[in-house]
Image (spheres, rainbow, N blue to C red):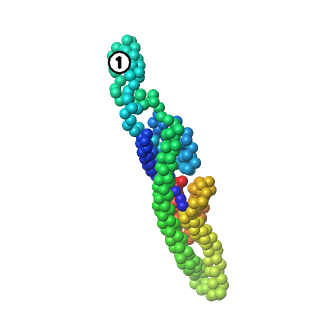
Amino acid sequence: MIRSMTAFANARTEFEFGTLSIDIRSVNNRFLDLHLRLPEELRFSEAAIREQLTQTLQRGKVEIRVQFQRAFNAEQNQLHPELLAQLAAQLQAARNIIPDIPAPRLSEVIALHHQEQGLDHEVWLPIILRCLESALHDFQAAKAREGQRLAEAMQQLAEQMSEHVQVVEQHLPDILREQQQKIADRLHEALTGVSPDGFAQISGEELSARVAQESALFGLRVDVEEELTRLRSHIQELYVILKSQPTATASTNKTRRGSIGKRLDFLFQEMNREANTLGSKAGSIEVTRAAIELKLLIEQLREQAQNIE
């Protein structure tokens, strides 16, 4: 099962100390690029959050936003006279030098009061990590759903490639027959041009042998059976990769997911090589068109694969 690098998830936890919300969103990127947006009071959890993310995610530009709101507690939200007295003294001292300094707003005083109180790390950190685990679970599920859609789109492209390969296979005998007729016509014109009774100088058996010889040489130049066989093999391998299931252990699954992008990139290189060879050996306009269509489909596959984790 493949996973997309584009996804979004949210988790929200309410408990006696307040409400915590975590948003995770990501887009494709060559490497894992984490961007954390944390309130200053939760900055102590950054290292633990990064560790959990790097153990779970492989690639992508990932943005994590953590927000929290304290539960209202009359006792905890009561402003202490000592704090207010300190603020008033500091404000007066500042006004002795800069008289027009405005007084702080009540919301700023309350925020300072909360900052003075601080947060209990031992209480908040486990809650943050549990909320993050819940968000990551939904996030991975969203990536898997998007990955399934990517796989279906790529399978449709692979089916179109198989159709073009089949067209070339069906057209090859006609190409050889047309070439045999062209060779016979050219020999006829050449012999007639030399002498009106030129055919009297060569037996039918010799003429057939010469036509067969020229046709065999042409057949060698346009023989694409090997290229078509390899293309079909590569298409089947693509199906296998897209339908592969994750393994039981997390570490093995991590390694397998990380190798899918590289495997697909190598596979598309091989497909493109066979399509180029097919185009260079094209003996008809139909084969040339098929080779061009195959190259376009391979490029579309490559673009889709860039979103795979």
Instruction: Assign the N terminus to one quadrant of the image.
Output: bottom right
Q: How many marks?
A: 1
* Residue sitting at x 58%, y 48%: 55
The image quarter containing residue 217 is bottom right
The image quarter containing residue 281 is bottom right
Judged left or right of residue 277, residue 62 is: left
Nearer the observer, 265 or 244: 244
Judged left or right of residue 37, residue 256 is: right
Judged left or right of residue 277, residue 164 is: left
Query: Residue 95's spot in the image, x, y percent?
Result: 36, 14
The image quarter containing residue 207 is bottom right
> The disc labelled 1 sits on which kind of residue?
Ile
Evaluate whether residue 86 shows in this view.
yes
Nearer the observer, 159 or 181: 159
* Residue sitting at x 39%, y 32%: 75
- Residue underneath mark 1: 101
- Mark 1: give few (<14), some (14-19) or many (20+) Cα within 10 Å: few
Query: Residue 243's spot in the image, x, y percent?
Result: 55, 65
* Residue sitting at x 56%, y 71%: 283
Residue 82's place in the image compared with 303, above or below, is: above
Evaluate whether residue 299 shows in this view.
no
* Residue sitting at x 57%, y 63%: 244
Give the SS element for disc 1: loop
Query: Residue 68's spot in the image, x, y percent?
Result: 42, 40
Judged left or right of residue 121, residue 226 is: right
